[in-house]
Amino acid sequence: MPVTIGQPPVVQDPPMQAPTEAATLAGVMDDLARRGFTEHFTVVQGRLRAATRGTTFSADQVVVTEYHRFEGVSDPDDMSILYALETRNGLRGTLADAFGVYADPAVGAFMRMVVVRHLAHAAAFNPRDR
């Protein structure tokens, strides 16, 4: 479009982009599974248990590679945390727990002993502070 003297040039707005959706627990679990975190872990008698294999690990055999916190849309007290964990023998998977007053004390006690790899957002949350 030609510009005439005395008139500002016409600037076109960039194309509209779809709004981004907030990450969901299920969505992050799917993403982690695609990246190799396929095992589901639980904490049983102070040890991390791989659900499909039945193998158990002590806290010194586990590292947190990343974690994600989620807050309920309608209730800010409805919070959860998802840990992406890797064991010393290379098994990778996830452990989910409530966050705050509804957290499982067994999971919290175990996670306080687990090493958190240096992450950019590790300063904002440390499982030892649960």
Image: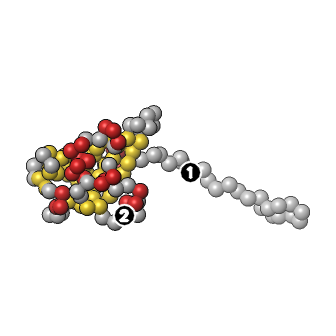
**Could you tell me which quadrant the N terminus lies in?**
bottom right
Q: Secondary structure at mark 1?
A: loop
Tag 1: amino acid: Gln
Which residue lies at the image location 70% right of the left edge and 56% below the top edge?
Answer: 12
> Residue 27 appears at what percent x and percent y?
36, 46
| Among numbered discs 2 and 1, the one appearing first in the sequence | 1
Asked if one can make out residue 34 in the rendered structure from this viewpoint, the answer is no
Q: CA distance from mark 2 to mark 1?
A: 30 Å
Q: Secondary structure at mark 2?
A: loop
* Residue 44: image location, x then y, percent: 14, 45
Q: Residues within 10 Å of mark 1 (few under 14, many from 20)?
A: few
In the image, residue 87 lies at what x, y percent?
A: 18, 60
Residue 30 location, x and y as percent? Answer: 31, 49
- Left or right of 24, for residue 19: right
Disc 2 packing (10 Å; few <14; some 14–19; many ≥20): few
In the picture of the structure, the residue carrying the numbered disc 1 is 17
Q: Amino acid at mark 2?
A: Leu
